[in-house]
C-alpha cells in the first residue's frame, strides 16, 4: 500500500516547490529588473505582483534610494501553470524633506 503512495507523494513534493525570486539585475543606467515565478503554488496575480514589487522596493532601500517608475509585466498564465511577474524599475534619490517654515 505504501509503495503505491510513494510516486504520488514525490509528485506532490515537486509540485509544491519551485517558486523562486530572481536576483535583481541591472538592465540600464539606474534601471533594474526582478522576476518572481510562482512555480505551482496557488497564488493570485495580486500576491505575485506584490511580492515582486516588495523585492524591488527592498533593493532600492538597501542602496539608500527609493523605488521609482515600476513597470510590471507577466506571462498571463492561467490555471495550474506557473505564473511569473517581472518588475522593471528605477532607484531614485530620496529628496530631503522641505523646510516647514515659510
Image (cartoon, grey):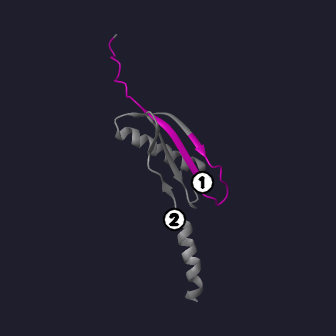
Give the magenta range. 72-101
Circle number at residue 83 = 1
Image: 78 above or below 25: below
Q: Residue furthest bottom?
A: 1
Q: Residue at x 55, y 77 (%)?
A: 9
Is 37 inside the magenta-drawn segment?
no
State the image coordinates of residue 36 (x, y, percent, origin top left).
52, 51
96 left or right of 86?
left
Q: Check disc 1 and report its element: helix, strand or loop.
A: loop
Residue placed farthest to the front in the image?
28
Residue topped by disc 2: 17
Q: Please name the predominant secondary structure of the magenta segment in the image.
A: loop
Q: Is residue 101 above or below residue 75?
A: above
Residue 74 in the image: state x and y as whole percent. Answer: 60, 46
For mark 1, does the 10 Å Cα neighbourhood hold few (<14), some (14 to 19), or many (20 or more) residues? many
**Residue at (60%, 86%) from the top-left corner?**
4
Amino acid at each position: 500500500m505504501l509503495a503505491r503512495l510513494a510516486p504520488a507523494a514525490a509528485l506532490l513534493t515537486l509540485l509544491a516547490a519551485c517558486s523562486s525570486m530572481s536576483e535583481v539585475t541591472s538592465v540600464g543606467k539606474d534601471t533594474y529588473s526582478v522576476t518572481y515565478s510562482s512555480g505551482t503554488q496557488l497564488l493570485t496575480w495580486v500576491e505575485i505582483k506584490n511580492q515582486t514589487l516588495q523585492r524591488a522596493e527592498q533593493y532600492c532601500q538597501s542602496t539608500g534610494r527609493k523605488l521609482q517608475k515600476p513597470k510590471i509585466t507577466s506571462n498571463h498564465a492561467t490555471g495550474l501553470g506557473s505564473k511569473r511577474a517581472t518588475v522593471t524599475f528605477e532607484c531614485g534619490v530620496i529628496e530631503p524633506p522641505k523646510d516647514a517654515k515659510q
